[in-house]
Amino acid sequence: MDKSVAKEIEKLKKDISFKKERIQDIKKLIHREIDREFASDLEEFSEKELDSYLQEYLEAMDRSFDPKPDKKSFTSHRKILGKLIILLKQLLLKVTGIYINLILVKQKKINQQGIVFHRALLLRLKRNRQKIKHIEQRIAECEGNLVILSKKLEDLSSRGPTRKTNKKTCV
């Protein structure tokens, strides 16, 4: 009976995991961008969800580590004066570009180093998780051996002394 319950629990866990994977990304579910960010409660995430969350944000950091604005980033919501405003913004960027580039080059290096640092931390975390898993397996094996040894010791102690010691005296 215990095996059937364990199998049923394992089946339910797999079903829940499969359903979580299907509904993991809200954007895919609604087929459009979300207009605001929702804060996630990271403490409720499973290991797998946390890994995918971290991977998603590292990929976003990889795409936007360069702080220099591109020409597509200049927009205006005004219909009539919009093109003129965009041209003024681009001109302002060209005029101040020399000074801004000095700062942005340093910022780009810092951003790249931050991404590398985060990736290194994630790699270390994965390796530590594997080591902990291995240690837990070894502890479980040791606990099993300890149970076996304690049962054997109880059996031996319940039998009482089985050997008689013969002392021979020398004359």
Image: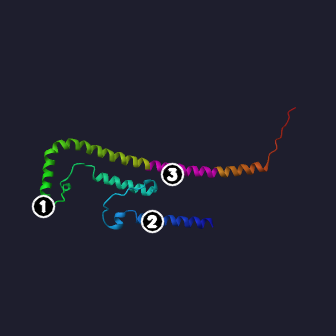
Q: Which residue is mark 2?
A: 18
Does 105 lie within the magenta span? no
Q: Give the CA separation, mark 2 to mark 3.
A: 23 Å
Could you classify mark 3 by the number of other residues whose Cα lies within 10 Å: few (under 14), some (14-19), or many (20 or more)?
few
Part of the protein shown in magenta: 126-145
Please tell me how many numbered marks the rendered image carries: 3
Sequence-first tag of 2 and 1? 2
Tell me the residue at 52%/50% (across/down).
134
In which image quadrant can residue 28 be found? bottom left
Could you classify mark 2 by the number of other residues whose Cα lies within 10 Å: few (under 14), some (14-19), or many (20 or more)?
few
Residue 22 image position (x, y, % from top left):
41, 66
Q: Which residue is mark 1?
A: 80
Residue 87 image position (x, y, % from top left):
12, 54
The type of residue carrying mark 1 is Ile
Residue nearest the viewer, comparing 31 with 86? 86
The type of residue carrying mark 2 is Phe
Q: Give the CA separation, mark 2 to mark 1.
A: 51 Å
Tell me the residue at 55%/65% (across/down).
9
Query: Residue 134's mark?
Result: none
Query: Residue 133's mark?
Result: 3
Quarter of the image with the N terminus is: bottom right
Does residue 80 appear to the left or right of 73 in the view shown? Answer: left
Does residue 104 appear to the left or right of 118 in the view shown? Answer: left
Tell me the residue at 60%/49% (across/down).
142
The type of residue carrying mark 3 is Lys
Q: Secondary structure at mark 1?
A: loop
